[in-house]
Amino acid sequence: MMKKVLIVCGNGLGSSFIVEMNVKKIVAELGKEAEVGHTDLTSAKSEQADLIIAAKDIADQLAGHSAKVVGLTNLLDNAKIKEILAENI
């Protein structure tokens, strides 16, 4: 079954879209498949996903979500994102 990865930021616009593009590229580099999308914090609370990647402050607000939630101090740290994806998809 394909994993669903959700990138979350406060408004679901700029930063999450950039990170979504990076995540899609990294998933391909890893030779894996995943459904990748981006959204805002409010919508994320009711969305189904296997993995959520967000900025640390946003991730803290998603505590208790059914997905694994990973908070990053730097959303553009592709090396860290690659590490997270390799372990979780």
Image (cartoon, helix red, strand yellow):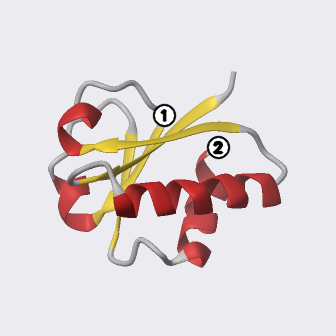
Quadrant for the C terminus, please. Answer: top right
Residue extending furthest toward the right: 31
Sooner in the amino-acid sequence: mark 2 or mark 1: 1
**In whole angstroms, how far apart are the C-alphas of marks 2 and 1?**
8 Å
The count of marks equals: 2
Q: Are marks 2 and 1 in contact (CB under 8 Å)?
A: yes
Amino acid type of the residue tagged 1 in the rendering: Asp
Q: Is residue 40 left or right of residue 35?
A: left
Q: Which residue is mark 1?
A: 50
Crowdedness of circle 2 by 10 Å Cα count: few (<14), some, many (20+)? some
Asked which secondary structure carries label 1, the reply is loop
Residue occupying image coordinates x 21% and y 54%: 10
Q: Quadrant of residue 42?
A: top left
Measured as percent of width and height from the top left, residue 23 is found at 60, 57
Q: Relative to 50, is 24 above or below?
A: below
Residue occupying image coordinates x 33% and y 26%: 47
Quadrant for the N terminus, please. Answer: top right
Amino acid type of the residue tagged 2 in the rendering: Ile
Q: Quadrant of residue 84?
A: bottom right
Residue occupying image coordinates x 67% and y 27%: 2
Q: Is residue 75 left or right of residue 4?
A: left
Measured as percent of width and height from the top left, residue 66 is found at 33, 29
Measured as percent of width and height from the top left, residue 7 is found at 42, 49
Q: Is residue 68 left or right of residue 10?
A: right
Q: Which residue is mark 2?
A: 89
Q: Which mark is residue 25?
A: none
Measured as percent of width and height from the top left, residue 71 is found at 33, 62
Q: Relative to 72, is 33 above or below?
A: above
Residue extending furthest toward the front: 14
Crowdedness of circle 1 by 10 Å Cα count: few (<14), some, many (20+)? some
Asked which secondary structure carries label 2, the reply is loop
